[in-house]
Image: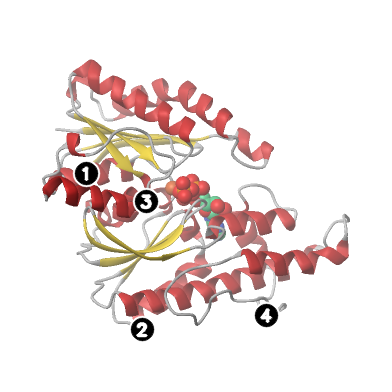
Amino acid sequence: RPLLAIETSCDDTACAILAYDGRILAEEVLSQKDHAKLGGVVPEIAARAHLDALPAIVSSVLQKADLTLSDIDIFAATTGPGLIGGLIVGSSYAKGLAIAMGRPFMAINHIEAHTLTPRLPELEGDLQFPYLTMLVSGGHCQCVSVKDAGQYVRLGGTIDDAAGEAFDKVAKMLGLGWPGGPALEKLAKDGRDDSYDLPRPLKGRAGCDFSFSGLKTAVSRLIEPFGSGALPRNIAADIAASFQRAVADVMKDRAEHALEMAPASTALVVAGGVAANATLRSCLEGVAHAHGIPFLAPPLRLCTDNAVMVGWAALERLHQGDHPDDIPTAPRPRWPLSERTAFRASVSD
Ligand code: ATP
Ligand code: FE
């Protein structure tokens, strides 16, 4: 019986329907374009836009799957972490549908969903536990050892900005639009990555924490001399390329450390929107191959925020024998993966 999932934790309104075995029956993502003009996500505007978009996107996905609401066996939605307004809107909507149809509701952790995505049957990666995920997105940057569905060990994470956030901020300094990651990568193609000797924060240090603030400051110092005038394009391109190289070097070092900390990992996985970056991907691929394990990066549409991953995380939990009622359903703007593990342990103990 199919499952319907909703994702609204940031600025993408997404809905998907999956069969019980994980086949994707229909999916749709609606990105809120207004935020590009505003230069970032405005939480209140995002929440209202989710509310406007949900009824149409849900019926459109049902239509694509050739199903009606009464065919849906279970409803799932992201309840955290993320922007509280969007979380409330999306999860209340899904809960409302569940109550109206007399079906269960399942609350899903957004990070858990990103982390489990590479196991989707359609990716045919045959990914087995335990594996190592580098989650690099606009809001998150962490290394997670995935021992099982519901069992995660966070090996390290950022102590300041997320990787995507650093890309976005540096892109802004270079006068690029928002979100800045893709624009920065494009510009970097025209630059030389050894033009500037930028810092590699925490490289070589024990553990696998990240830090990007020093790197960001170093870039702002390079730009300072140009004042408020436009930065010459060739210089902006050289800075972009050098910045990207620095991030990739750090990522490589951190991934190597993470694999030392979790030596049983069967694969190295990259997830989150920053996984779109080809330089970072090839760096991480190199690390995986040096360790003799496969490298996996889901296709872009499943790397950025989407509802397929939410549905899949719910299915993984169901396949594990979890009951929807076992999971607290109140939206939580902050919801570390470790707390889910602690919760489960206290329930079964
Ligand atoms: P989260 O998933 O943590 O809630 P989010 O919704 O912002 O946050 P995603 O949609 O997964 O995250 O990813 C968006 C981020 O990825 C943005 O910060 C964007 O700049 C970055 N990004 C996208 N493409 C690239 C790229 N090619 N190179 C670098 N960064 C990129
Ligand atoms: Fe995300």
Q: Residue at x 88, y 59 (%)?
A: 227
Q: Using the numbered discs, state the Cα–Cα distance from disc 4 to disc 2 in whole angstroms.
A: 24 Å
Mark 2 near ligand 1 (CB under 8 Å)? no
Q: Residue under circle 1?
A: 23
Contact between labelled residues 2 and 4, with CB atoms less than 8 Å apart: no
Mark nearer the N terminus (3 vs 2): 2
Mark nearer the N terminus (1 vs 4): 1
In the displayed structure, does residue 336 sit left or right of residue 247? left
Q: Does the image show residue 142?
A: yes
Picture layout, residue 311 above or below residue 202: above
- Looking at the picture, which amino acid does disc 1 mark? Arg
Q: Using the numbered discs, state the Cα–Cα distance from disc 1 to disc 4 in whole angstroms.
A: 45 Å
Q: Which mark is residue 194?
A: 4
**Helix, strand or loop status at disc 3:** loop
Q: Does the image show residue 234?
A: no
**Helix, strand or loop status at disc 1:** loop
Mark nearer the N terminus (4 vs 2): 4
Q: Residue at x 63, y 42 (%)?
A: 40
Q: Residue under circle 2?
A: 290
Picture layout, residue 340 above or below residue 152: above
Quadrant of the image occupied by residue 152: bottom left
- Looking at the picture, which amino acid does disc 2 mark? Ala
Mark 1 near ligand 2 (CB under 8 Å)? no
Q: Which residue is at the far top? A: 100
